[in-house]
Amino acid sequence: MAFFDIASAAAFMLCLGIALAFILAIANRKLYVYEDPRIDEVEEMLPHANCGACGKPGCRPFAEALVKGEVDPALCTPNSQDMTEEIAAFLGVELGDHTKRVARLACAGGAHVAYFRAEYSGLKSCRAA
């Protein structure tokens, strides 16, 4: 009796697995979304900083916009000049102005803009941080 119960459970699980695999295979074919293979290649040429300096939320959306021709490769400021030229040559587009920009940050904090809630015992200047 026990052998029959185990064998029937195993057979049921086997049939269930085959049926679900068949359903997944059909769903994969019906729901397939074509994606331009150049997007992956362009994304590999980007620095993967996901900084948003180009105006896109990350490197993947920037690569998609590059392949569609919506943006200029020079908008990626962390990318080197050589890689930017390589991306432009790969996509067959003209390279725009690629000037290196440097972020200038200024400390705007202090007791005059923040409420005093606790005694701070750390570094006393933004430059030290």
Image (cartoon, rainbow, N blue to C red):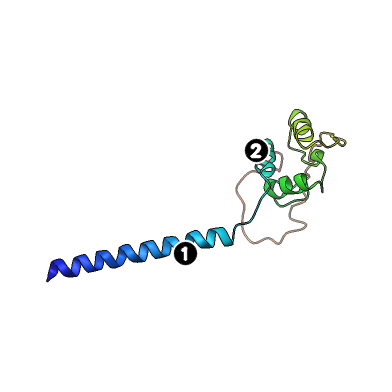
Q: CA distance from mark 2 to mark 1?
A: 34 Å
Viewer-nearest residue: 48 or 110: 48
For label 2, count other residues whose C-alpha is less than 10 Å away and answer few (under 14), some (14-19) or many (20+): few
Q: In the rendered view, does 25 fall on the left or right side of 52?
A: left
Query: Residue under circle 2?
Result: 44
Residue 95 screen position, x and y as percent: 85, 35
For label 1, count other residues whose C-alpha is less than 10 Å away and answer few (under 14), some (14-19) or many (20+): few
- Farthest residue to the top: give it: 82
Viewer-nearest residue: 22 or 64: 22
Q: Amino acid at mark 2?
A: Glu
Q: In the rendered view, does 65 fall on the left or right side of 124?
A: right
| Residue at 66% in and 50% down | 35
Q: Amino acid at mark 1?
A: Ile
- Farthest residue to the left: give it: 1
Question: Which badge, 2 or 1, is on the more N-terminal residue?
Answer: 1
| Residue at 81% in and 37% down | 101
Query: Quadrant location of residue 59?
Result: top right
Secondary structure of the residue carrying tag 2 is: helix
Image: 117 above or below 96 = below
Query: Residue under circle 1?
Result: 23
| Residue at 77% in and 33% down | 84
Q: Quadrant of the C terminus?
A: top right
Badge count: 2
Q: Quadrant of the N terminus?
A: bottom left
The mark found on residue 4 in the picture is: none
Query: Quadrant location of residue 126?
Result: top right
Residue 20 screen position, x and y as percent: 42, 64
Is label 2 or label 1 in front? 1
Image: 93 above or below 116 = above
| Residue at 77% in and 57% down | 112
Secondary structure of the residue carrying tag 1 is: helix
